Amino acid sequence: MLPSMYRGLWRAAVHTLRASKGNPPSRFLSTCNGVSSGLADAETIFALSSGHGRCGVAVVRVSGPASATALSCMTGLTRSLPAPRTALLRSITDPQSKEVLDRGLVLWFPAPHSFTGEDSLELHIHGGPAVITAVLQALGSVPGMRPAEAGEFTRRAFQAGKLGLTEVEGLGDLIHAETEAQRRQALRQMSGELGRLYQDWSHKLKRCLAHVEAFIDFSEDELIEDGVLNQVDRSVCDLQAEMERHLKDERRGERLRSGVQVVIAGATNAGKSSLLNTLCQRPAAIVSPIAGTTRDVVETALDIGGFPVLLSDTAGLRDSPDLVEREGVRRARERVEQADLTLVVVDSAHLPSDAQKAATILQGHLRSVLPTQEQPKTVFSADRFLLVLNKTDLLPEEQRLKLHRELRLVSGLPPVSLISCHTNKGLQDFLTVLHSSVKTLCGDPLSGAPTLTQARHRAHLQQCFAALAQYQRYRDIDLALAAEGVRLALTSLGRITGRVGAEEILDIIFKDFCIGK
């Protein structure tokens, strides 16, 4: 929701727009200064593109056929438009009253060389609420203009072919990126690398479909070269192998986009809430010496070395006659099952000094936290679990060093960190281990092939993969059904990129085959 200071300006702009719609329709909308604003059914949109709130400079964006009209009406440039993409200092005036509203920079982007592919205008004005309100109200009084809807500028850029769907999604992710790794991944996707990968697959599928359909239509006339279907078979197999590798990414891109789910779990009074408060550096959870203080899940978002983490503190795992606490334990186990990484917190003061005995107790703690369906397994993956031995300030220094030294040599345990949330001792080493685990779960967004970032991408690619299996299943039984499998695969890919058409297939048929030769 917009801040209260801006709600009035949008209502005023919408009111001005609605009032102008009572005028008789005409082919061209009349304007001030006698400049045509374009066709009546072609809407021009405007909006504040910079962030809301008081600031030094605010950017108001305009896009559509009436952009030149708005420029002329509000800057007094009646004879000629300014040079494209050149900043010009002008007085911004109300087109009705001619009152000067502000003095700022004007930039003109003629079609098609603009973000939206349409004539576009940017007004760089002072960022005070009164100035912004006045300029937006003035724009709303220009015939043929209306306030933009959410994402409408980007939608027009997509419709004009300036951006593909994956690039649009990358742009959205870049705007919402909160960590360095998210920014890198979003920028890589917005640059079109992921879209180019899918477009390359689409092009190969179009070629396969064109060859199969040409074989169906023209093979009896001996107008098709031998071995065409064998080429299709090889291409389909290669594509399936590429897609399978792409899908087996362990959700790294999606995890980086939405955040790594890290859950703090363990027995009561082990210091789980203290660990949460220490990591987020604020009292997010209540801490007390009373066992079972935490009942519900407490969440906080963190930036761990540039990677996004959603950290959850959970109820202590124990059998309890208390109905509320039992529900908290149920929710805790549910979170562990959903977690990408679980921090198993143990009170180190309760561990024996002998490393082997301590390891046996720690494995018991791990099994008590492990989801039920994984109980038979004895290997605790470092990618899924970290052992955190808390309250080491209560141990003699010699015992602490011995535990730290000997537990690292015990097999069958995930990485072990010894910390004290009271003194922060060992915290930096633990953060290094945590960062390494989170980085492994997310991967490097700049290395290797681009990764899947959206659940919808994965769903459509799985449909595409299944459709290619249909081609292989029916290839020697019914070639028409096999071709339909390729067509379905192409459609599924097209739903990711937003671009697929029958004309492209026909173009390839006539380009690749000399029919009637």
Image (tube, rainbow, N blue to C red):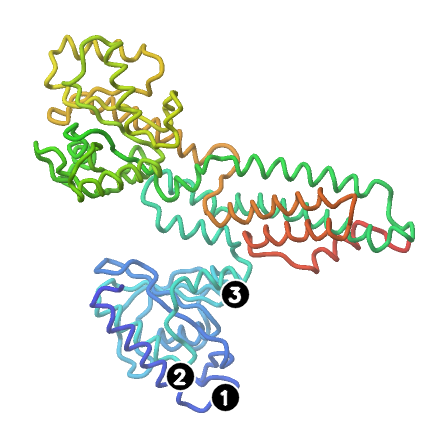
Dot 2 falls on a residue whose secondary structure is: helix
Q: CA distance from mark 1 to mark 3?
A: 24 Å
* Number of the front mark, 1 or 2: 1
Identify the residue at the far left of this view: 289
Task: Give x and y (percent) for residue 338.
Answer: 35, 39
Question: What's the amino acid at mark 2?
Answer: Cys
Where residue 238 appears, as percent x and y from the top left, is 67, 36
**Where residue 403 sits in the image (x, y, percent)?**
22, 11
Residue at the disc numbered 1? 26
In whole angstroms, how far apart are the C-alphas of marks 3 and 2?
22 Å
Q: Quadrant of residue 506?
A: bottom right
Quarter of the rendering containing residue 120? bottom left
Q: Is residue 114 above or below residue 316?
A: below
Which of the marked residues, 1 or 3, is nearer the chain's N terminus? 1
Q: Earlier in the sequence, mark 3 or mark 2?
A: 2
| The quadrant where residue 320 appears | top left
Which residue is drawn at the image coordinates 20% and 33% (left, top)?
319
* Residue kind at label 1, given as amino acid type: Ser
Q: Which residue is mark 2?
A: 32
Where is mark 3, residue-wise? Answer: 111
Gap between marks 1 and 2, in whole Å? Answer: 16 Å
Name the residue: 53% across, 57% down: 162
